[in-house]
Amino acid sequence: MSTFWSWWIIVITVVTLLGSLWLLVANRKTTISGQPGTDGEAPTTGHSYDGIEEYDNPLPAWWFWKFVGTVVFAAVYLALYPGLGSFQGLLGWTQENQWEASMAAADAKMDAQYAEYASRTIDDLAGDPAAKRMGRRLYNNNCSVCHGVGGSGANGFPNLADNDWLYGGHPEAILATLNGGRQGVMPAWGAVLGDEGVVNVTEYVLSLSDEPHNAAQAAAGGEQFAMFCASCHMPDGSGMQALGAPNLTDNIWLYRQADLTLAENIRATLRQGRNGIMPSQSDKLRPEKIHLIAAYVYGLSQTGAP
Ligand code: HEC
Ligand code: HEC
């Protein structure tokens, strides 16, 4: 906030507070002296509306002091907490440090539990229901937006429960994926292959997993596959985990936009390329948490059940 707007807010707030206090005190007693009351009744202000007279009663004391109290409360609050422009308040309270303090308190409570789990292998934890429950909670908070509840996956986001892996599914590979992140690089082939080439190679890719295809086009596409694709996807199409190049023979597809046919999805992959990004978790989550999540994910592929 610029200094000008900060002072703008400070001045308006303070003037409003003092102004309402002044209004209250100044009007506590009306200065219009009206008629004295009869029979012990309060005096009137002298105002008369259609014969109805206005009494000159003071404000009730409880109401008056409650109002003063709210003004005092506001002044004390604005001195202690942020609220007056960019003034931080005497307590130094911020939303962030409150959040951090409560996270630290929660972490401290869990520390003993985490330490116990961190000392056990992922293989071991994947068979421990209590550890898996904690892992599932962490997974749901941090991973399910992309990979779905239970690791079901989505278009462009790999299924983590099917025991089919881009980068490998043993505990070390999963840990490496979580800690370092992954970036799949599938170059675009539209310009190299041309329209006919894209169609032919697509038929060949379909043939690799025994999907319906045009045999003549697939044969032509096979030659181009050997030339352009085998270096990453291997000559037999079985993929390469070091690069995250998917196995093209298992009929499991990472890119499967629902309103397109399988052939259309593959042609789109070839024309435009694909660059799936798995964000690194090591700067977001403590190693103990990553360890538990890895155990949960590993367990998914072992049993297929969340
Ligand atoms: C912003 C979306 C996003 C989030 C959040 C995310 N991932 Fe991923 N993840 C991806 C994408 C995209 C890929 C595939 C990368 C590629 O195409 O090469 C991937 C890949 C993976 C893989 C490799 C799968 C394989 O077949 O080898 C694992 C394991 C994984 N993620 C686990 C997790 C876990 C556990 C979390 C939570 C801590 C998580 N991911 C959070 C998007 C995400
Ligand atoms: C430089 C290595 C490399 C080359 C060369 C390459 N690919 Fe890929 N391919 C990849 C990677 C990595 C992915 C995964 C992209 C991702 O995770 O976002 C991929 C993804 C794909 C997919 C999507 C699979 C799915 O499950 O949705 C298809 C289909 C494919 N490639 C076919 C081909 C064909 C056909 C060629 C040759 C014209 C080819 N690739 C050349 C690395 C390569």
Image (spheres, rainbow, N blue to C red):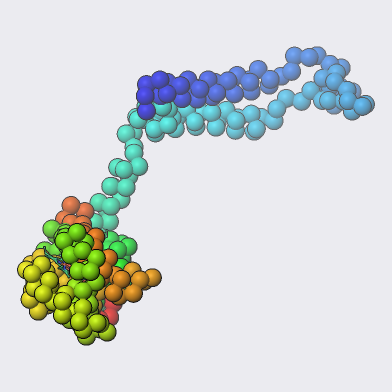
Q: Tell me: 138 left or right of 86.
A: left
Does 186 appear above or below 5?
below
Q: Is residue 173 above or below residue 1?
A: below
Place of residue 201 in the rendered image (x, y in percent of width and height, measured from the top left):
19, 73
In the image, residue 197 lies at what x, y percent? 19, 69
Based on the displayed image, in which of its 4 quarters is residue 301 positioned?
bottom left
Is 205 on the left or on the right of 99, as rendered? left
Residue at the image position 73 percent from the left and 25 percent from the top: 58
Q: Quadrant of residue 267?
A: bottom left
Residue 254 rendering spot, x and y as whole percentages:
25, 70
Which residue is located at x 9 percent, y 79 percent? 236
Q: Nearer the viewer, residue 79 or 305?
A: 305
Q: Position of residue 198 (x, y in %)?
A: 22, 68
Q: Is residue 102 above or below residue 51?
A: below
In this rendering, does residue 75 appear at all?
yes
Q: Is residue 123 visible?
A: no
Quadrant containing the C terminus is bottom left
Nearer to the camera, 255 or 59: 255
Q: Quadrant of the N terminus?
A: top left
- Front one among 228 and 237: 228
